[in-house]
Structure formats: structure tokens, C-alpha cells
Image (cartoon, rainbow, N blue to C red):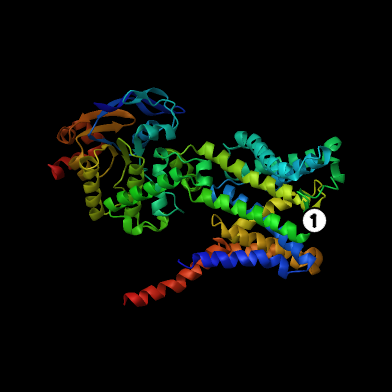
Amino acid sequence: MRLRWLYWLIGGIILFLIPHVISDEYWMHMIITTGMWMMLAVSMDLIYGCTGQLNLGHAAFAAVGAYITALLMLRLEWSYWLALPLSGLGAAAVSLLVGVPTMRLKGLYLGLATLGFSEIVRLTLLMWASVTRGPMGLPGIPLPTFGSFTFESKTSFYYMILALLLFTVFCVYRIIHSRVGIALMAIRDDEIAARAMGIDSSRYKILVFVVGTFFAGIAGSFYAVYVSFISPDSFKMLDSFMIFAMPILGGIGTLVGPLIGALILYVLPEATRVFAQYRMLWVGILLVVTMVTQPLGILGGLETLAGKFRRPKNGVKAE
Amino acid sequence: MNLLTVEKLTKHFGGLAAVSDLDFTVAEGEILALIGPNGAGKTTVFNMLTGLTGITAGKARFKDTELNGMPPFRIVELGLGRTFQNIRLFAKMSVLNNVMVGFHCRTRTGLFGALIKTPRASREYRQAQERALELLAMFGLDGVKDEISRNLPYGQQRGVEIVRALATDPQILLLDEPAAGLNIAETEILMEHIARLRSDLKKTVLLIEHDMKMVMNISDRIVVLDYGVKIAEGGPDAIKADPRVIEAYLGTGFRKSHA
């Protein structure tokens, strides 16, 4: 693993060069949006893949973050750099309100509760017209500025989402590889045994919910300034399901899996736009086929494959 | 000194009295076995002691601390570790991480310590890993540290469960049928391990077990339960000869074969 830094360097250079190599605006838009979905998928995986909490309302927390940013910037003319963390904290605070009464629920019951919550968010955004302008949404969200620099070009937004995504991945990585992460996985595998081994499971389940939705709020906040228009339809229930499917498709609890899942599940429907209304069909087929043939997700499948290639090698050596 | 004191401990599930007015104590350094027919309430006693089920009436104390109403994770902190009858390892985690879970209650790193990776957090994590490996090595399990626990053979899974419980640094270890499902050779190894828990690690052991050869061999004292009621208590020889125990549990053939 002495070459590790080299991989990091090459990876860094590629990520840095992307906007300079790809000049097509549409493709840059795709890449930027994929980055946002990756953020949502990774934070979802912390809640579902690592801790086993079925959260079917992740997009609703992104909507909360997006609206907080939009309202703070439009109504109070606050700086984006203040609105961004507040959106994350706002989404986290809301998740605390949802989390405390629902954390006793398990599996599908928690899933239904979070699904119900996402409907509450949607209806609130729709009906509270005096603040949210209801179905008309909030247009004209200002562009973020930094000193005299304005985030306007696709390149600048690319670097912004790259930074936010790397921050998310970094935080989730650190959490997974710590005492806290081990406790989360223990809760996922057997909550009663985890409690009997000294883990305050309720506390950790709420904690991970709050942390995961914090990143969802941040992702929503980015979306608001990037697209500069949000409405109750910006983050729909279907989006929550897609975010839920991303880590599962890629491989849960693996950190890289959710990134792959987000890439495929966001790019595939876009790339098959020519098939118009049939495009979601491809997503459905892909999900069914992957789950039937690779229950551990794409990454899990790849690891099994790599293991098959590795083992005979060792076997030969032993002889 | 008594580590564990149980007074008039009672558990009702609806109208069913699973455990009634149970009294016993476990002295420091002792190996006490809890035996009795299936459904006698042995595991229920363990679940009450570790906070997994509520206590209907009576008291359980660890040293001077009352355990009634205390959540499981606090009880572990006090120094009661346990294993489960139907192995409850964290199936998708590695053996090493399973044991690392045990150190949870003896370490302190929180969310921010993890995010910032403070020197203290790193040190704590490293030390826990080292000690986990030491414990695994002690039970001959260091070779499988990276295996996913559900892929291990049954006997090794039982071993990992004991190591995981040891990682919580208990003063008393509650073992729920550790020999269940083990073959004769594995049971022999297990008996040595349990003997070493006391001799090398200075642990007190409270044991539920159906393997009478093992129970009679390693226990200092035995408490016999039947229908949730204590029917006998004493040393292995006294228990073997107790007519009530023979009738309720051991069977009349036992005396001849183990005499």
C-alpha cells in the first residue's frame, strides 16, 4: 500500500480536471446533480446501511434544507455561507423532532412513519403559501458569492458540490471507522445483543438519524442555490425511494457502494431520456435484476468476484 | 463477598409465573450453575439480571447497586457480562469488530471525537483493538479475526461470544448454555476455557447448562429450578443425590451412570 498516495493524487487530479475537460454544459449539469445525489445516498447509507434504520423520507429532509436556504436568502438576504450550515442544522433539528417519538419503531413501521413525515413536509410546503408561495415555489434564489467572486458557472458549482461531497464522505468514513460506527453496525445486526453489550441503542439511533439528515439538509441547500428555483415538487416521495435504492443497489455499508448506486440510478434515467415515459422501466428492471442476482449490491458482487479470482492463486501457492 | 444477590425475584408473563420468589447469591470467584428442565425460567433469570426483561417483583443487586429498572447498557457498565443461549453475534461484522463492540462500555469516544479523530480517540481505538486481539488469542481465535462471524463454525461462534462478553470487562460472567450444540471435543475445550476464566482472569461465573458432566465438573454450587421455583441448592454431590432434583430433572438413571 505504498502506492496509496499515488492513487489519491491521480484521483484528485482527475476530479480537479473534470470541468476543464468536459465543456458540454449539459454533461456538467449531470455531473453536478449526480454529486448531490451521491451526498444524499451516502448520508442515507449511514442511516440505513450502517444502522439499519429504514428511512423513507430522506428527500423530505433535503426539501427542508432547500427551503431554509431559499427563505433565509430571499426573505432575510442572508449570506449563503450562513444559510448552508443552518439548512443542515435545521434538517437535523426536524429529524430530532421526528426521531425521538419514532425511534421505538423498527423496520417497516419506521419506514411508514418517515414516509408519513415526508408527506407532512410536502403538504406543509404546499399549503403554507404565505411563507413558501405554495405550488408556485420560490424562484430567483440568489447566487452564492465569496468576496467578489460569484458562483455562477458550472465549473464553480462543480467544485462546490465536490467539496460538499468529499466532506460528507470524509465524515461518514470517520464515523464508520470509529467506536461509534462499530456501535451502529452492532445495532443493525442485533439491537438486543447490542444493548446487552453496553450500547445505548436509542441514543445512537437518534444520533445517526440527526447526522444523516444534516447532510441531506446540506444537499438540499446546495440544490436551492444551484437551480435557483425550488417548489414542493423539487424533492418528491419518488426521490426518497430512489435515495433509498441507491445504497442497496451499490452495496450497503460500503461507502463506495452508495456512490456507485447514485451514479447509476441518477444517470440511467437521464441517459435513457429518448425512451421518454419508459425510462423508469429501465430503473425498475435494473433494480430487480441486481437484487435477484447480487443481493449484496454491485460492490458486494464485485468483491465476491474478486475473491473467486484470488482464492485459486493462494491455493496454487499452498501446493 | 457476594457479587450478586437475588431476593424473592419474580417474573410474570401475563398470568404465567416464569420465576417465583427466587433467592440465591453468587460469591466472588465462584462458579455457580443454574440448572433445571426446559422452561424452568433459567434464561428469564438471566434476562432480568441483565435488564432485558423487567422484574415483576423482588430484588436483584450487584454488590450494593440495585439492578431493578436499570437499562441493559448500564448493567454492563457495572460489570455483568453475558452470552446468549441462541448465539447472538453481530452476524455481518468481522470477529474482531464483534469483540470491539464489547469494549464500547469501557471507552468514551463520541461523535466529535470520531469526526475529528482526536489523539485520544485514536489511542482508545488502537488499545481496544490490541486488547481484543489478546483476548481472541487467549481463546485460540486470533486466526479468524477478519472472518465475518456468521461464516464461522458453531463452536467458534460460541467462543467469540464469550470473548465479546469478556471485552466488556465483567466481574461476573453470565453464560447461557455455552455447551449447547457443541461436540464432545469442543465441550472439553470450553470447560478448560471456563476454568481459566476464573483461574487466570479472576472472573466469577454464573452458568446455565444442560451438560451435566460439565456442570458437575466445574461448578462450586448448583441452584436447581423447576417451574420457576428453586427446588434445591448445594454442591454437585449433594445435588446429584437430591431426590427432588432426580425426579424433576436428572432422572433416576443419572445416579447409576454418574455414581
Tell me the kind of residue under disc 1: Glu
Q: Is residue B254 left or right of residue A49?
A: left
Q: Is residue A84 left or right of residue B75?
A: right
Instruction: Mark yes or no: residue A200 visible.
Output: yes
Q: Which residue is mark 1?
A: A152
Instruction: Mark yes or no: residue A280 visible.
Output: no
- Choose top left, top right, bottom left or bottom right for residue A108: top right
Give the answer, above or below, for where A175 lies relative to B59.
below
Q: Is residue A308 left or right of residue B182?
A: right
The x and y percentages for residue B87 are 38, 47
- Choose top left, top right, bottom left or bottom right for residue A260: bottom right
Give the answer, above or below, for where B5 lies relative to A63.
above
Tell me what residue is drawn at x 65 percent, y 54 percent. Answer: A163
Front one among B164 and A192: B164
The x and y percentages for residue B144 are 35, 58
Residue sitting farthest toward the left? B259
The x and y percentages for residue B45 are 36, 32
- The chain to which mark 1 is attached is A
The x and y percentages for residue B200 are 22, 43
Q: Residues within 10 Å of mark 1 (few under 14, many from 20)?
A: few
Task: State the SS at label 1.
Answer: loop
Q: Is residue A172 left or right of residue B225?
A: right
Give the position of the N terminus of chain A as an image quadrant: bottom left
Tell me what residue is drawn at x 80 percent, y 63 percent. Answer: A277
Front one among B96 and A152: A152
Front one among A123 and A144: A144
